[in-house]
């Protein structure tokens, strides 16, 4: 990407304001991007691909503000619809918007674009729903050989009211547990499973490589393979993005 991961993280800190603002944007990120892309494209029937979801997750993980993603989508479709040479082909991937999202994020980094005020944590991240969703992951972890990680989640659930007071720290803890799950799952992968995942990744990326930078491609590869691995082991994600 044009700005590195540290710069994007700095941009998030500059524009996030109070913890409530971070929480509101955090919870809505995936849903907002999906709905905004569908609206810009002009159809609610369009389903984003695994590559699209990996791209959104990559933006989130590198601290790209939600507003930058939405602005980049709008700018991309405005450019697409104003082109002189008209074709019947639709925009079928978020990768079409990647460069515009990067540009919008860099503008926010330089404080040239104001950030919208997000909902409060209480409005966006209901305590009991999150606790119940997280608790539902425990049997899955135990049943699929991740008892150590299940015990860690169980401890968080037991003191969830306290954890809910600091959602950013909670996400860091859940992400650390996810990484341990992934490390164990990667170690158990067969060569055939790894090659199959790589083939699917190459098939997904092939039409989009010309629109993405090397950094974006690397980010997408990791997100795609991680999501694929979670699907294979039969365990749902722990990140707050996936709990509700």
Image (cartoon, rainbow, N blue to C red):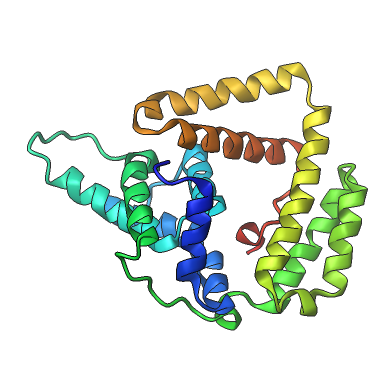
Image: 212 above or below 36: above
- In this rendering, the count of numbered labels is 0
- Quarter of the figure with the C terminus: bottom right
Furthest toward the left, the residue is 84
Image: 110 above or below 22: above
Residue at 80% x, 74% y: name it: 160
- The spot of residue 209 in percent (x, y) is 40, 27
Q: Is residue 110 left or right of residue 162?
A: left
- The spot of residue 207 in percent (x, y) is 38, 26
Image: 171 above or below 142: below
- The spot of residue 191 in percent (x, y) is 75, 17
Residue at 37% x, 43% y: name it: 98
Residue 86 in view in this figure: yes
Residue at 89% x, 66% y: name it: 155
Residue 44 in view in this figure: no
- The spot of residue 79 in percent (x, y) is 18, 46
Image: 133 above or below 187: below
Q: Is residue 14 left or right of residue 143?
A: left
- Quarter of the figure with the N terminus: top left
Q: Closer to the camera, 137 or 105?
A: 105
Image quarter of residue 87: top left
Image quarter of residue 183: top right
């Amino acid at each position: 990407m044009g700005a590195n991961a540290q710069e994007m993280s700095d941009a998030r800190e500059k524009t996030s304001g109070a913890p409530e603002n971070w929480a509101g944007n955090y919870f809505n990120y995936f849903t907002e991007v999906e709905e905004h892309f569908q609206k810009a494209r002009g159809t609610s029937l369009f389903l984003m691909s695994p590559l699209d979801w990996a791209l959104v997750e990559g933006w989130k993980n590198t601290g790209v503000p939600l507003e930058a993603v939405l602005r980049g989508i709008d700018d991309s479709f405005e450019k697409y619809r104003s082109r002189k040479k008209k074709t019947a082909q639709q925009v079928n991937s978020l990768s079409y918007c990647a460069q515009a999202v990067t540009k919008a994020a860099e503008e926010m980094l330089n404080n040239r674009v104001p950030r919208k005020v997000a909902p409060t944590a209480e409005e966006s991240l209901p305590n009991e729903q999150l606790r119940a969703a997280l608790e539902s992951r425990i049997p899955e972890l135990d049943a699929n050989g991740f008892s150590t990680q299940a015990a860690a989640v169980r401890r968080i659930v037991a003191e969830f009211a306290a954890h809910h007071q600091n959602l950013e720290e909670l996400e860091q803890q859940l992400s650390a547990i996810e990484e341990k799950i992934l490390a164990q799952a990667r170690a158990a992968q067969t060569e055939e499973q790894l090659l199959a995942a790589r083939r699917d990744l190459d098939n997904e990326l092939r039409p989009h490589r010309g629109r993405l930078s090397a950094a974006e491609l690397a980010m997408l590869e990791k997100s795609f393979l991680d999501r694929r691995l979670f699907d294979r082991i039969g365990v749902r994600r722990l990140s707050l993005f996936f709990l509700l």
